[in-house]
Every structure is written in structure tokens, then in C-alpha cells.
Amino acid sequence: MKKKDIALHHHIAALNAAFSAAGFRATLSGDAASYRAAVAAIPDYHIYSPLDDSLADFGAGMLWVGLEDAQGRMVAVEAGRVIDAPAKAGGLNAVLNSRVFGRVLPVVDRPPPVNLTGRLAYLGGAWVDPDLRGRRVMSLTLKLTIAHLVRCYGIDAVFGFVRSKHAGLALAPEGYGFTSATALDLMYLPGEAAADLLCLVWTDPGILAERWSLPADYQIGPAAARGKTGKKPSERRSAGPSPRHL
């Protein structure tokens, strides 16, 4: 086994151990049908078109990670899918406006200034129980999803979209851990305030393999006190998908 593969194995084990120590269990699945079924139980959760297999081509592969509490209730979700974007075919800019990606984004006349190429992974569909926010649950769930994508598909780089005001969170090592970001001067979702612009975030090719060997903080933050309802987070109504990235 190569050194980087050993480091990746240890990284995944450390993430799973952190979840277990906090009373959670991470599950992994590799098909769109199980993803649809799982998120159907989350109130107000919407599957955006890049992760909707009726709108996008999943032929290169996909997987998703679910986080369950001790009662088996879903408390966090993150999904990812593989997009082959070779340089000779135009890279990522060529597939943002095709069935490979899903919804056609209005970037044809003004593509992102950086064009990612190679075997890419799109990260999206993030949701976390509102009462678990601020404990790094979403951050670690996303990092586990990335690790499994690299393990299963040999990903060169990962990317996603966030609201520009959350770019700092996306780039922070203790946040989502992306390495680069660029604003696209487009609204995050149609009809939203111009202040919430779409921002492309990505991890530079070659950086992923290096990160498994770096010191990392896998600790999940302490649980917050119960609210006025007296209910546990998993017993309260969810507030829909996390607004921080698609």
C-alpha cells in the first residue's frame, strides 16, 4: 500500500472515530436512489440539479455520506459526484452548461477565471440538523465525503459553490478546507439578493494527497444546551438544507 493511501486510511479512521466518540455513526452509499430515499425524510430538503440523476448524468460515479445519531435518525448529509473534465474537452467550464452538471448555469459568456481539469468531484447537498451547527459536524462530514471520493475514484480536485459571504468558512482549514475561491458575479440562487453572490470554491490539484499527512483537528464541538422545547436536536423540526453551499 502506498504511503498516501495509508495516510488516507488513517484520515478516514480518525474521522469515523471522532463521530463515534460524539455518539454518531457515519454511513456510506454509492447510489442516487438511496440518497433520494434518505433525504426524502428531511423536511424542506431540496435536491439541487447537479445531484438530481433525472437531470444530470451520473455515469462517472457518485456517493453520499449520512450521519446518524444513537437512535438512527439522520442528522447530517453530504453528497458528491464524479465529473470527468479533461483539458482537451474544455475542462470544467465546458461541463457547467451541460447535462453532465445538471442545471445550466449562466456562465457561458463569463466562465470562471480558473478552469479545473481532470477527474473532478462536485460536493453538494449539504444539510445538518440546525441545532448541531457550530460543532464542526458539517465540516467533518464533508471531509469524510471527500476522502471516500478520493479513495473510490482517484479524484484530482474537488469543487463546490458557496455564497460569497461564506467563502471564509469554505477556505478555513477548520471549516470546509478548500484552498481557493473566486466570485462568479452571479446570484447564488435565482431571485435572491445580489449581496449573496455565487462563489466557486475548490481544492487545488495535488493538494488532496498532501493533506492526509498533515496534523488535523478531528474533534466535534460540545453539545449545546437544550432549547426551550426541551427536545434533543434530532427531535426538532429541521430547517431545510444548510444554506452554505449547494
Image (cartoon, rainbow, N blue to C red):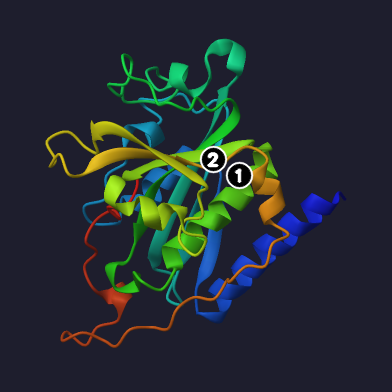
Q: Are marks 2 and 1 in contact (CB under 8 Å)?
A: yes
The reply, left or right, for residue 19 in relation to residue 199 is: right
- Counting the numbered discs, the total is 2
Give the answer, above or below, for where 138 lies relative to 209: below
Q: Residue at position x 58%, y 28% from top?
A: 60
Residue 76 drawn at (x, y percent): 40, 61
Residue 116 drawn at (x, y percent): 53, 28
Q: Residue at position x 58%, y 71% from top?
A: 217
The reply, left or right, for residue 231 in relation to residue 77 is: left
Visible in this render: residue 59? yes
The reply, left or right, for residue 83 in relation to residue 221 is: right
Give the answer, above or below, for where 86 lies relative to 32: above
| Residue at the spot of label 2 | 158
Numbered disc 1: secondary structure: helix
Residue 109 drawn at (x, y percent): 31, 14
Q: Residue at position x 53%, y 69% from top?
A: 25
Residue nearest the observer in this picture, 218 or 71:
218
Quarter of the image where one finds residue 193: top left
Q: Crowding at label 2, few (<14), some or many (≥20) Cα neighbours within 10 Å?
A: many
Residue 149's mark?
Answer: 1
The reply, left or right, for residue 5 in relation to residue 172 is: right
Visible in this render: residue 246? no
Amino acid found under the numbered disc labelled 1: Leu
Who comes first in sequence, dot 2 or dot 1? Answer: 1
